[in-house]
Image (cartoon, rainbow, N blue to C red):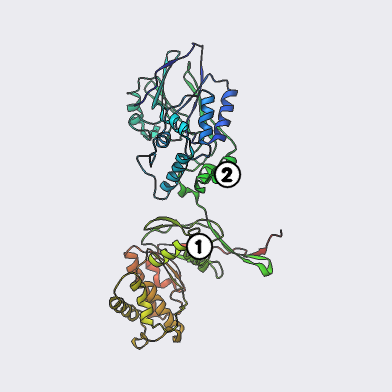
Amino acid sequence: MPRAKAAGFPQKVSMRIGLISDIHGNLHALEAVLKVLEEESVDLTLCAGDLVVYGAYPAEVIKLLRERGIPSVAGNYDHAVAFGLQCASTKPSSLLNEPIKQAALRWTQTTLTKPCKRYLAGLPWRMDYRLEGRRIAVIHAGLEALDEFLTPQDAPALHALVGRMEADVVVLGHTHLPFTFLAGEVLVINPGAVGRSLDTDPRASFALLDSAQLSIQHFRITYDVERAARAIAASGMPREVAEMVRRGLRRVEQLEEHLTKHFEIHLLERQVLAFEGLSFALKPGELKLVTGPNGAGKSTLLRCLYRSYLPTSGQALYHSKLGWVDLARAADEDIALLRKQEIGYVSQFLRPRPRVSAVELVAEPLILAGESRQDALNAARGMLETFGLKSELWAAFPTTFSGGEQQKVNLARALIRPNRLLLLDEPTASLDALARAAVAERLGELKHRGVAMLGVFHHPQDIQGLVNGTIEIAALEREYVAEQT
């Protein structure tokens, strides 16, 4: 492990030592912290690593630390940037969060100059100081790896660490969680994160150590987090990074950007609010009902998820076979591919193509998926029979059918091939009891196969035993005068 030689300083009655860590390219936070430390008349400031990644000013952070003569150990992100690693952690984050982290890492690797990377490459993994007889060691995380996660909740690990350190004080970072812990006679200090809080408090965190008394003060101070977040958003990094810094969040899943949709009626200078601030989760194999009064926006929600409508704001995060996709912002080409391969939609209305028979219309999803025409037609006949469409109508054109007959064709087409996500908009509104029972049976089969389903039902009692929960859309004041410009 690269290690800096022990350094001594002129003896004083007491030395005031500023402790900082995890700046993460956030120049605004660093400047605010150093200003307070200057006002506190510190004699020395030590940094426990992770100077870069996430913030928009990694080079400026490095420059300021060097100008102030503030020594630092290497953090896992410093190491990853310096040596061009694809990932800064040995334990990847969640499927949704990891791409955000890697995008911020790649941005920093591309942005920083070679001299900055050489500086980061030269940072030691450990620094040792002797102050008034006190042995002070600084590391970023553990001794084995730069991303060991050590907190007081794992006291045995901290005791094991200090047992190998030969120090009176151990300063570390990485977790972004400030704490002071006494492991035997060794004081372990984590000053928290200067530049990226993870505990929902976006203020900058640091600490002040009195070397003689071994007393410690922890600080949380405000800084211009809005400017820091705006700089990140303008940098080209994912906008989620800016939001996590702005709100002090660890993972992108915590953003909870609620889905909202309103319609512009330009002729009347009105906006009609369909729904606002919806947030819910749907797991594989779950069926949830969307409920609410007439006109509340139930069908609009399904159309936003299917992207027939474009949501006004918020996120609709969908875990596809290829990874996470925001259905509210994905490209039209990606939505078209998801509709073809993974996402199904059933409405109470069938819009059949002219001169295409019912059986051919129902077989089409299987044919597009690669099944033989004969197998697809046989499966289509079975589905039409299941939903009670008379066999003499199978070869007829659905444009001539009644509403109930068209809905049976619609259901057979939508349910013949399992999707990962199925959106059901009043699929049984025009069906008789026997057909509704057949639909419920088929939905049960799809649940068993792991299909996630979201539905609006005219007869919810038909599927009562299949429902895992409800999503209530409240009645809102729907109309108001648009702002004049």
The relative height of residue 128 versus residue 101 in the rendered view (above or below) is: above
Residue 268 location in percent, x, y? 68, 69
Q: Which residue is drawn at 40% across and 67% down?
A: 340
The quadrant where residue 185 appears: top left
Residue 218 visible in the shown view: no
Left or right of 300: which side holds 394? left
Write the residue at 43% across / 16% down. 7
Where the C terminus falls, by quadrant?
bottom right
Above or below — where is 304 with respect to 49? Answer: below
Q: Is mark 2 on a helix, strand or loop?
A: helix
**Distance between mark 2 and mark 1 Cα atoms:** 35 Å
Of residues 192 and 143, the one nearer the viewer is 143
Q: Which residue is drawn at 32% across and 80% down?
A: 381
Amino acid type at mark 1: Glu
75, 156: nearer the viewer: 75
Say what secondary structure mark 1 lies in.
strand
Q: Identify the image quadrant of residue 410.
A: bottom left
Numbered tag placed on residue 472 in the rendering: 1
